[in-house]
Image: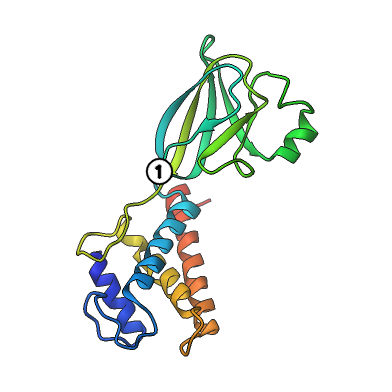
């Protein structure tokens, strides 16, 4: 779907004259607010469903404590550690510092074979391996990248047509929760449920029926 068509649909739903999202005569929302809602919806869908992933490899020196993630990183889908000498590959699971402390006391100062990765309590766009790698290796990273921004310029949305409704309802939920004379929590809750339905559909499409 073209982004301006989606913006017109939002205008019709919110009882605004449809013009591709250019004007909002009610003054309840601005064009920038609506685009924020749409872009937030696109990013949420990409992050929550892992519709598309990007692969990259990051070289890591021995004893490295901070690994920089790609600048377009949005969410991690999978990480595998590959030893630079033996080429042995070890899948890594997500952990936090508390879990790491319980499972491997001293993991920060006692190097070894990485078994997990910590990113929730690290600086933005960084992660740390647990334990700290004793030898050099490569992080094989599958990640969700930040989708192209929707600008309302007549370009296609950065996702498959099947998921346009998810973006529409997530954006509506955001807009209907704005404090003002059209605040409508009940309709916003309904829109959230429609978004969740699209999440389930995406999981079925990606993983198949079971």
Tell me the residue that label 1 is attached to: 72
Q: Residues within 10 Å of mark 1 (few under 14, many from 20)?
A: few
Q: Position of residue 58 (x, y in %)?
A: 46, 26
| Side of 204 relative to 1 (left or right) | right
At horizontal 73% and vertical 34% (from top left) the residue drawn is: 100
The picture places residue 18, in percent across and down from the top left corner, at 24, 82
**For numbered disc 1, what is the local secondary structure?**
loop
- Percent position (x, y) of residue 10? 33, 77
Colouring used for the render: rainbow
**To which quarter of the image does residue 159 belong?**
bottom left
Judge from the rendering whether residue 19 lies leftward or rightward of residue 141; answer left or right.
left
Tell me, yes or no, if residue 208 can be seen here: no
Residue plotted at (41% across, 40% down):
71
Q: Position of residue 192 (x, y in %)?
A: 51, 71
| Up-down relation of residue 159 to residue 62 (above or below) | below
Nearer to the camera, 190 or 141: 141
Task: Decide: is 147 above or below 180.
Answer: above
Q: Could you tell me how many numbered marks the image carries?
A: 1
Q: Residue furthest top?
A: 85
Which quarter shows the N terminus? bottom left
Tell me: residue 31, above or below residue 185. above
Q: Residue at x 36, y 72 (%)?
A: 34
The reply to whether residue 201 is visible in this rendering is yes
Q: Residue at x 47, y 73 (%)?
A: 174
- Give the image quarter of residue 23: bottom left
């Amino acid at each position: 779907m073209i982004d301006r068509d989606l913006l017109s649909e939002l205008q019709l739903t919110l009882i605004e004259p449809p013009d591709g999202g250019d004007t909002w005569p009610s003054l309840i929302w601005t064009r920038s607010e609506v685009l924020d809602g749409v872009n937030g919806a696109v990013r949420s869908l990409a992050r929550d469903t892992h519709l598309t992933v990007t692969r990259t490899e990051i070289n890591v020196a021995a004893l490295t404590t901070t690994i920089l993630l790609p600048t377009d990183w949005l969410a991690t889908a999978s990480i595998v550690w590959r030893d630079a000498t033996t080429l042995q590959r070890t899948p890594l699971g997500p952990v936090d510092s508390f879990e790491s402390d319980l499972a491997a006391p001293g993991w920060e100062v006692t190097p070894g074979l990485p078994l997990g990765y910590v990113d929730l309590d690290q600086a933005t766009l960084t992660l740390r391996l647990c334990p700290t790698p004793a030898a050099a290796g490569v992080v094989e990273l599958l990640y969700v990248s930040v989708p192209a921004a929707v600008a309302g310029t007549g370009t296609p949305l950065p996702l498959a047509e099947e998921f346009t409704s998810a973006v529409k309802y997530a954006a509506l939920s955001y807009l209907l929760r704005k404090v003002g004379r059209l605040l409508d929590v009940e309709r916003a809750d309904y829109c959230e449920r429609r978004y969740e339905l699209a999440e389930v559909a995406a999981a079925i499409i990606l993983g198949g029926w079971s």
